[in-house]
Amino acid sequence: MKNYKIKSIGVVMSMLAVFSSCTQDFDEINTNKNTLTEEQLDQTLAGPAFASALYAGIHHGSYSSPGVDDQGTWGIATGILPSTFTHYLSCGYGTERNAFVNGYEGRGWLRFYTVAVPALNNAFKASEGNAEATAVLKIWKVYMYNQMTDAYGPIPYTEAGNNKEKVPYDSVESIYTDFFKLLDEANTVLSATTSTTVGTLQPNDRIYSGNVQNWRRFGNSLKLRLALRISDIDAAKAKTQAEAAIAAGVIETNEQSATFKVSNITPNNLNMIVNSWGYLMTASMESLLVGYNDPRLAKWFAPINPTAAPAAQIYRGRPVGGLQGQFGTTTFSMFNNDVLGSGSNGSLSETKNIEVLMASENYLSRAEGALNGWSMGGTARSLYEEGIRLSMTQWGITDTNAIANYIAGNTLPSIPNAATLYPNIGLQTVPVTVPVAWQPSVATQRTQIAVQKYLAVFPESWEAWADLRRSDAKVIYPVINTDNNEAGVGKTLMKRVIFVTNEYSANRDAVTDAIAKLKGPDSGGTRLWWDTK
């Protein structure tokens, strides 16, 4: 095979079909005959491989790379799983009723281990001897593996891509231990370097263009996120890691936020498919956004009567968990075509950047940390309110009076519109009964933070799902019907994604060991290591 000198992300995505061709079974990932050899991986390939790891690592796929991936990965791996579990959208598939059907749990797994992981491993090999590039790659490794372990539990990690047919699974606890180690190592390197840009990654880095300080802040923000995640299982370590992250410097402005810059080769899959696949606004989102008079409502969703005067426009969210045909021909709100739909000329997927980790999340996490007694650089209230402001401005809300009124608002989430049409499905009991305005009770404050983080993280549902499980805040409705009566599931929030069917046949011993590490059955009701409540 030639030592290809790849210069653009478009070529990278096409070449992945050669470098890391997709397979039907996971065992083939580790015996791929088309993978570049280590001798062929010089530093000119570090950036292109990193580009592929970035895009595939956020579960997006390019239709410009036939045989490698397409937008269906986001639609299934993200849309039908975490976005549905969190009620960010109503997809109409069986996962709305907490059922794993049609192998949906396998699409994201397959693409992760056949596209994202080989690309990241190639980037590491090509960056050997480059401390700054390796530091950035360590940060991205934590980000993309964190989503997978928080979804499935134990996963192949230490030996993923080891060129062996059988790949062991690591426990969630051991993976988290390594996460903190990698983030510490990355911060040490990026804090000490005199370089402002990682030159080998810069041309292909569609998040930060190789900016050293932005990547350093991103890594510390990840550390803050992970510290909160383990706060119920290891409070002392959580405090130490969170305070270290703040001391080292985290993302603090929208300009520093991590967003993937899209292109015609690497489009925003959400904008490509939410409306074309029939994804709709949910009753949970309607209850919060309408009840709070949230200025983001019209940015995210479309009224069912768009030609009416603004004051008369109606938003209607579909209850999650409906049976086939249960809602007949009832019209529900779609995603706003000008912001989160396909766009008026169908080009929004090539212009609307992809949210990865936003400043607003950090402030809301810091607010919760302050309630825990951690040193977070501000009071819980000031950090909470700044997080809301940043989320508003991120979505183009520039009216300072509107933002101030929202923060001071005492209205409560409302009963969804569908409750009038379907009075017997349980929508009258609204999950959230707290206003936006800061309240005196610490217990109420924790709920307020959880609700506002749920809204601020939208539409990045992998983190929203993990945070709902960890916080146990009642933010969304139970599903109205369930197809899953396993212990811990029913109509409640799904706790994890089950292991992939092909793994049982191709890597059975490892899966058996993974279930032992999971400490519970391979079901959607088994809590992960950090999910203790």
Image: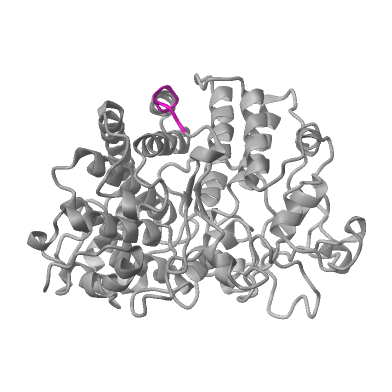
Residue 249 is a magenta residue: yes
Rendering quarter of residue 94: bottom right
* Front residue of 440 and 128: 128
Residue 437 appears left or right of 386? right
Residue 102 appears left or right of 158? right
Residue 307 appears left or right of 274? right
Task: Please determine whether, in this image, residue 65 is positioned above or below residue 211.
Answer: below
Residue 35 appears left or right of 403? left
Quarter the N terminus occupies:
bottom left
Residue 476 at least partly seen:
yes
Task: Please determine whether, in this image, residue 250 is positioned above or below residue 470.
Answer: above
- Write the residue at 36% across / 40% down: 211
Image location (x, y in percent) of residue 421: 87, 68
What secondary structure predominates along the stretch shown in magenta? helix
Tell me where the magenta segment starts and ends, as one range.
245-250
Image location (x, y in percent) of residue 513: 26, 57
Image location (x, y in percent) of residue 518: 36, 52
Task: Please determine whether, in this image, residue 317 is positioned above or below residue 526.
Answer: below
Residue 447 at least partly seen:
no
In the picture as drawn, the residue positioned furthest to the left comes out as 39
Residue 247 is a magenta residue: yes
Rendering quarter of residue 453: top right
Image location (x, y in percent) of residue 449: 64, 35
* Front residue of 125 and 508: 125
* Color scheme of the displayed model: one colour
